[in-house]
Amino acid sequence: MKQTMLIILGVVTIIVAGWAIVGETGAVGLNAKIERPWLCPTQLYLKADLQEINHPDLFKWRFAKKAPPVEPEPVVTPPPTPPPTEPQVREPEPLKWEPMPEKLVYFDYDKSMLRPEAKAAIQKNVQFLKENPNTRILIEGHCDERGTNEYNLALGERRAESVKNYMIELGIDSSRISTKSWGEEKPVAQGHNEAAWKQNRRAEMFFARQQQ
């Protein structure tokens, strides 16, 4: 049977159509009707929403409707959290170096000391740099071909540092100045004599405007 039966234990109602058992003595009378339940201590009830079905005999039965199947609630899976995006860092554009008003200063053989005319040229450049504070400075040191590569690289660095230190004495912040030595790698005059060598013993000065 597709329905769940509700059984009330110990309760029986006897109904006799037209005849009934009368009284405690068990007398029978016509058209008399009595309902006498025999009760048991325990009664079993199922949930309401009952349906009555009359048994063709003398008993009355009541059945509960079958509860509808419980559909499980769908499990909602949240979408995965995307990884945090890192802010994009814009690469600074390379500096565009330009020659200073006085680009060159020269040195004696195997020396890094500034000549008087070199100091005068540097002073003009310092005045330009003070009028343009949003600029950076690059000083490159060079040598002639005599001497080893290692020695000339060190000599070129000393020449660039001499120019830098004099600019600092004149009031330029050291954080604005960079130096580089090329040694004998970049001669401006080709030759193996003093006329070529004296042009190659030099320092070159450049400036670049900083990006806002």
Image: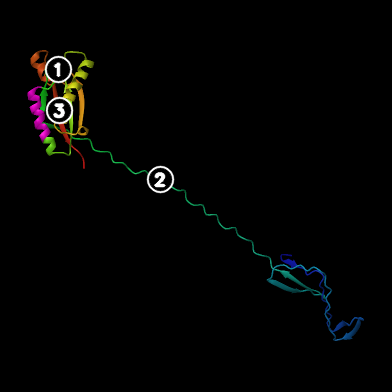
Q: Residues within 10 Å of mark 3 (few under 14, many from 20)?
A: some
The disc labelled 3 sits on which kind of residue?
Tyr
Between disc 1 and disc 3, the foreground one is: 3
Residues under labels 2 and 3: Cα distance? 50 Å
Quadrant in which the N terminus appears: bottom right
Between disc 2 and disc 3, the foreground one is: 3
Question: Looking at the image, which residue is at 14% across and 26% down?
Answer: 204
Q: Which mark is residue 111?
A: 1
First in residue order: circle 1 vs circle 3: 1
Q: Secondary structure at mark 1?
A: loop
- Taking the magenta stretch, the answer to whether it contains residue 48 is no
The disc labelled 2 sits on which kind of residue?
Pro
Q: Residues within 10 Å of mark 1 (few under 14, many from 20)?
A: some
Q: Which mark is residue 84?
A: 2
Q: Which residues are magenta?
A: 115-127
Between residues 186 and 71, which one lies in front from this camera angle?
186
Between residues 151 and 197, which one lies in front from this camera angle?
151
x and y, in percent, of residue 141 in the image: 17, 23
Q: Secondary structure at mark 2?
A: loop
First in residue order: circle 1 vs circle 2: 2
Residues under labels 1 and 3: Cα distance? 16 Å
Give the quarter of the image for residue 61.
bottom right
Describe residue 40's horizontal placement relative to residue 70 as left or right: right
Question: Looking at the image, which residue is at 71% across and 72% down?
Answer: 51
Q: Which residue is mark 3?
A: 166
The disc labelled 1 sits on which kind of residue?
Lys
